[in-house]
Image (cartoon, helix red, strand yellow):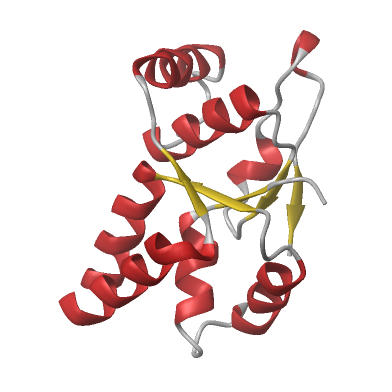
Amino acid sequence: MESSYVDTSAWVAMADGAEVSHKAVAEALRIRQGCLVTSDHVLHETWAVMCYRHNFYTAEKLVNTIRNGIARIEVSGLADLEAAAAIGVAFADQDFSLSDRTSWAIMERLGIHYAISLDNDFRVYRFGPGRRQAFSVAP
C-alpha cells in the first residue's frame, strides 16, 4: 500500500470522539496504518489546535502518540518552504495556510498522492504538469 499523508484535521478528529468525522477518520487511519506520513509543521499545528480546544495535557498526549510511531514524521526543509511560497504565488486567489502548502510540497517531493484530511483545500489544490493532478482525499 502506498503512503498516506495525514493532515492536522484528521489527527484532531481521530483524537476527539465528539468530532462529527471521528469514526470516518479513525477508519481511514486504521485501513492505512503502517503507511502514514505527517510533518513537523502538522505536529506543531495539531498541538496548537488541541491545546486551544482542550488542554496542554491532551495536546501533549496526542502529539507524543503520533511521534512514537503512528506515523513517520517528515521534517520540512528549506526546499519545502520555497515550494510552499511558490504555491502561494500560483494560487494567489486562495488563502491556503503555510502548513497546508508545506504539506503539499512534502507530498509532491515524496510522491504521495493520498491524503487523510477534512480540510477541503486538499481537494482544491492541483499539482503536476499544468496543475491538473489532484490528491485522493479521505474520508
Q: Residue furthest bottom?
A: 18
Q: Is residue 8 left or right of residue 29?
A: left
Q: Residue at x 48, y 39 (%)?
A: 100
Residue 83: image location, x then y, percent: 48, 15
Label total for image: 0
Q: Report the residue that reaches farthest toward the left.
A: 56
Q: Residue at x 79, y 9 (%)?
A: 129
Q: Position of residue 53 (x, y in %)?
A: 28, 76
Q: Is residue 63 visible?
A: yes
Q: In this rendering, is residue 58 above or below 95?
A: below
Among the 4 quarters of the image, the one containing residue 55 = bottom left
> Image point 36% across, 73% down: which residue?
62
Q: Relative to 62, is 51 on the left or the right?
A: left
> Toward which corner of the image does residue 64 lie, by quadrant?
bottom left
- Closest to the observer: 1 or 103? 1
The answer to whether residue 55 is visible is no
Residue 39 vs 17, above or below: the answer is above
Residue 61: quadrant of the picture: bottom left
For the residue pair 43 and 131, the one nearer the viewer reads as 43
In the rendered view, would you say 38 is above or below 127? below
x, y (%) of residue 130? 78, 9
Q: Position of residue 94 (x, y in %)?
A: 52, 29
Judge from the rendering whether residue 113 lies leftward or rightward of residue 20; answer left or right: right
Nearer-the-camera pick, 32 or 123: 32
In the image, taking residue 91 as reference, residue 28 lies left or right, namely: right
